Image (cartoon, rainbow, N blue to C red):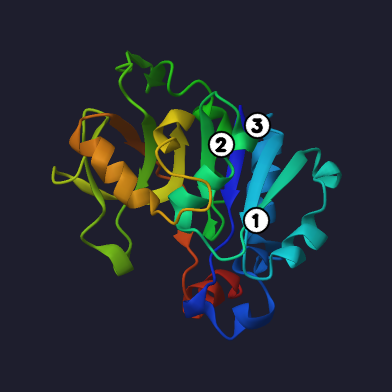
Amino acid sequence: MKAMILAAGRGERMRPLTDATPKPLLKVRGRPLIVWHIVNLVRAGITEIVINHAHLGQLIEDAIGDGSKFGATIAYSAEATALETAGGIANARHLLGDEPFVAIAGDIYCPHFDFEQVKNTLEDKDVWGNPYPLDQRDVAWLYLVKNPAHNLQGDFGLHSFSISNEGQPRHTFSGIGVYRPAMFDAIAAGQTAKLVTLLREYAARGQVGGEVYRGEWTDVGTVERLNQLNAPL
């Protein structure tokens, strides 16, 4: 299985920090956000990783390199201007192959996420010891989290491992999901497109599954949240 880390965002709300440093290289507890993901992916045996970038992207390549120091093989998908999340994935489609892959937002902090659980997700799913036969129409499996204070309304409904746009209870999309590559085929390379829009289209058709992740997770979207994470314990 391959992984893609989405690292092309400008990080406007993180300025002035992101004027000189791409957001995925901002450090939490002594380690860049993107490195937390790489280390956790490699620990799970997922070593083929694609990283897209735009703003100050060369700094990401300089810091991470070819991935060998982490035990990974890393390919880069450079964007002249950020193509948004789905656009970034579509632009890197040729690097991802034809099998389901996991994509991770580069600006989230989830140090204990076990990427072993994403393997073979779109083939079958064993949740809490109970086999869940995945509908073969499903094109994505999302990991949701409890709604944080900055998103109390949530993003998606979840019932019996099925994601819906309007259902209850509602949870927030963590930024981690497993996707069939074909769901991005309608987006041309270089086209701007948002992942949440695409997911809502497929959720409306009943083609998105998911579950709740209950471990530590933070959307590092503001300087205040970054400072809170780095405050002395």
Residue, far bottom: 16
Give the amino acid at mark 3: Ala
First-in-chain label (3 vs 1): 1
* Dots 2, 1 in contact, CB < 8 A: no
Residue 151, by quadrant, is bottom left
Q: Nearer the viewer, mark 3 or mark 1?
A: 1
- 55 left or right of 31 in image: left
Please tell me which residue is depicted at 39% across the width and 49% down the height of the picture: 195
Residue 94, by quadrant, is top right
In the picture, the disc for residue 44 is 3
In the picture, the disc for residue 34 is 1
Please tell me which residue is depicted at 39% across the width and 40% down the height of the picture: 143
- Name the spot of residue 49 as percent of width and height, x first: 67, 40
* Dots 3, 2 in contact, CB < 8 A: yes
- Mark 3 Cα shell of 10 Å, populated few (<14), some (14-19), many (≥20): some
Front residue of 137/209: it is 137
* Label 2 sits on residue: 114
Residue, far right: 69
Front residue of 77/215: it is 77
Tell me the distance, in whole angstroms, between the alpha carbons under discs 3 and 2. 7 Å
Q: Secondary structure at mark 3?
A: loop
Front residue of 78/131: it is 78
Give the amino acid at mark 2: Asp
Tell me the distance, in whole angstroms, between the alpha carbons under discs 3 and 1. 16 Å
Look at the picture and state if 88 lies above or below 206. below
Tell me the distance, in whole angstroms, between the alpha carbons under discs 2 and 1. 15 Å
Residue 76 seen: yes
Residue 233 seen: no
Q: Secondary structure at mark 1?
A: helix
- Name the spot of residue 224 as percent of width and height, x first: 48, 79
